[in-house]
Amino acid sequence: MLRNQLFKQAIKSKVKSQNLKQLVDGFRSKSFASIKSVFALCSLILPYSTFHSKVIKSGLVSWLLVLGSWFLISFTNPTYKIAKLKYNGGGDWYANRTALPNLIDFCNKNLGTQIAAEEAIVEVGSGDLFNYPFIYLTGHGNIVFTQQEAQNLRKYLLAGGFLHIDDNYGLDKFIRPEMKKVFPELEFVELPANHPIYQQKFKFSAGLPKIHEHDNKRPQGFALVFKGRVICFYSYESDLGNGWEDFGTYPEDNLTTREKALKMGANLVQYALTQ
């Protein structure tokens, strides 16, 4: 959708040099909104290169190829980070220590992303939250958001950010009331198996996969949806993060299940960057 919007915007403005300059300047920003634009426009360049003779005559293709070359040069090195959310309340926000680095490596290799290899750590109430397009929250225990933290997280999500809450067993009774502070008007809804979040590069026809067994309950993927956009995905009774950790961390680890976990995580990252 974002790719089509950018293309239509470029046609409408007749690709004036000033507009292109503003577009490029925007891409140089470190904000997650610009990261999404880069991710989308890179996939736009080739499919539309022969779209219409008028488009070609307008010089759009030439400009897009120039931009494409610039992207290839500029994004050879890691260009942004994703972060783990540090919260108060006593819960182990630091759980699954090797999970995000392994997911990042998988995404860079399989999605072509250029995410920095090491995760960032960011506090709920910090202004730095807005530097990251994807935030990961996990743990087993208590979570407490202050009013300021809840407001900051709300602003981040409404501005285009994405939060993945990963139940590491026992998180449910703590996270639900805290997210009510953030979005009192919203309820977690279970996403159907045909939702786009399960239909990114990797297809999950049955929805969220089961990774780590706890109570013999089925895995469920819940979401907070604001004006049609999934702003928060909550993986419950799945424990994706356990599957992202170094192989052999848990006695029951197997390569098939770990691959499912990494693929589902990659879908979340892809969805967050392109929705």
Image: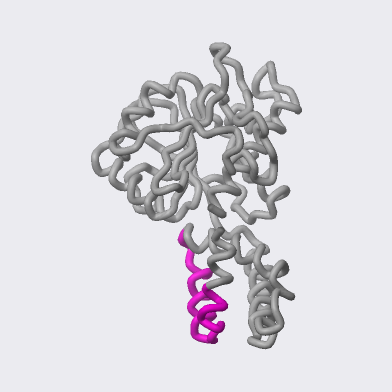
On screen, 37 above or below 122? below
Q: Nearer the viewer, residue 41 or 135?
A: 41
Note whether 119 is above or below 214 in the view shown: below
Q: Nearer the viewer, residue 181 or 130?
A: 181
Please give the range of residues in magenta.
9-31
Residue in view at x 59 percent, y 63 percent: 3
Total marks placed: 0
Residue 121 can be seen in this image:
no
Please tell me whether residue 95 is drawn above or below residue 15 in the rendered image. above
Residue farthest to the top? 215
Q: Position of residue 88 (x, y in %)?
A: 34, 32
| Front residue of this view, candidates 74 and 20 | 20
Tell me if residue 170 can be seen: yes
Prevailing SS of the magenta stretch: helix
Q: Is residue 259 left or right of residue 116?
A: right
Residue 51: x %, y % from top left: 70, 74
- Who's the residue at 62% across and 38% down the image? 198
Q: In the visual, does 122 lie left or right of 9?
A: left
Quadrant of the snapshot with the N terminus: bottom right
Foreground residue, 36 or 14?
14
The picture quadrant where one finds residue 147 is: top left
Q: Left or right? Give the position of 237 relative to 130.
A: right
Residue at horizontal 41 percent and vertical 38 percent from the top: 86
Magenta-colored stretch includes residue 68: no
Q: Is residue 15 magenta?
A: yes
